[in-house]
Image: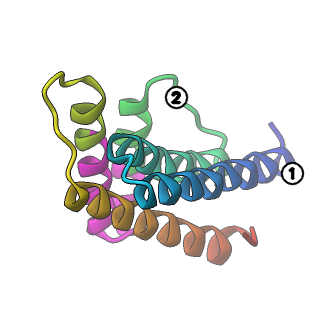
């Protein structure tokens, strides 16, 4: 894939992230807490995939994409460690919320997830704008 297509894919994935953030906000506002938690994870995941698109890297499994992002971008200092920690929390809480039969989502959990998703998305937007001339 040439650079122009990678840039376009990255931009598309950030647009997915933004749209999903709006959905997460609507879910939070309407107390659809499990749905908010799910959407918040995808806000961050799509943003991570936007970074990977720039270098032409993709993974079929979420855990592989996140592990690669953490190893290549967080551990190397390109992103603050908080991004990796929050990404891990988003994934864990989303999995608990989606797959645990007895998980009860709280407003506090959903709000923390929303704030984490916003933080990660903003950090990735800054990175893409500063390093790839990709204006969001």
Q: Which mark is residue 78?
A: none
| Magenta highlight on residue 19 | no
Q: Is residue 75 visible?
A: no
Local packing at callout 2 (Cα closer than 10 Å; few below 14, some 14-19, many 20+) is few
Q: Which residue is mark 2?
A: 59
The mark nearer the N terminus, 2 or 1, is 1
Residue 31 shown left or right of residue 21 in the figure: left
Q: Which residues are magenta?
A: 70-91
Where does the C terminus fall, quadrant-wise?
bottom right
Question: Which corner quadrant holds the N terminus?
Answer: top right
The answer to whether residue 55 is left or right of residue 31 is right
In the picture shown, does residue 107 fall above or below 33?
below
Determine if residue 45 is in view.
yes
Depth check: give the residue in front, 10 or 45: 45
Label 2 residue SS: loop
- Return the residue at label 1: 4
Expressed as whole percent of the image width and height from the top left, the position of residue 44 reads 46, 52
Examine the image and state in which quarter residue 120 appears. bottom left
Q: Is residue 4 left or right of residue 15?
A: right
Residue at x 34% of width, y 63% of height = 116
- Neighbour tally class for label 1: few under 14, some 14-19, many 20 plus, Cα within 10 Å: few
Judge by depth and name the residue closer to the eye, 47 or 37: 37
Is 119 left or right of 60, judged from the image as shown? left
- Is 89 magenta? The answer is yes
Give me the residue at 66% from left, 48% from top.
16
Q: Position of residue 24 (x, y in %)?
A: 48, 53
Image coordinates of residue 29 in percent, x first then y, are 44, 61
* Residue 8, above or below 136: above
């Amino acid at each position: 894939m040439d650079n122009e297509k990678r840039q376009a894919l990255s931009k598309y994935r950030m647009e997915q992230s933004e749209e999903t953030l709006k959905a997460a906000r609507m879910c939070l506002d309407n107390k659809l807490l499990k749905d908010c938690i799910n959407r918040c994870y995808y806000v961050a995941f799509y943003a991570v995939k936007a970074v990977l698109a720039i270098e032409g890297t993709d993974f079929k499994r979420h855990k592989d994409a996140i592990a690669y992002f953490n190893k290549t971008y967080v551990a190397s200092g390109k992103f603050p460690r908080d991004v990796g920690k929050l990404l891990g929390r988003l994934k864990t809480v989303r999995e608990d919320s989606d797959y645990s039969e007895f998980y009860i989502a709280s407003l506090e959990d959903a709000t923390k997830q929303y704030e984490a998703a916003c933080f990660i998305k903003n950090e990735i937007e800054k990175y893409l704008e500063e390093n790839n001339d990709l204006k969001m």
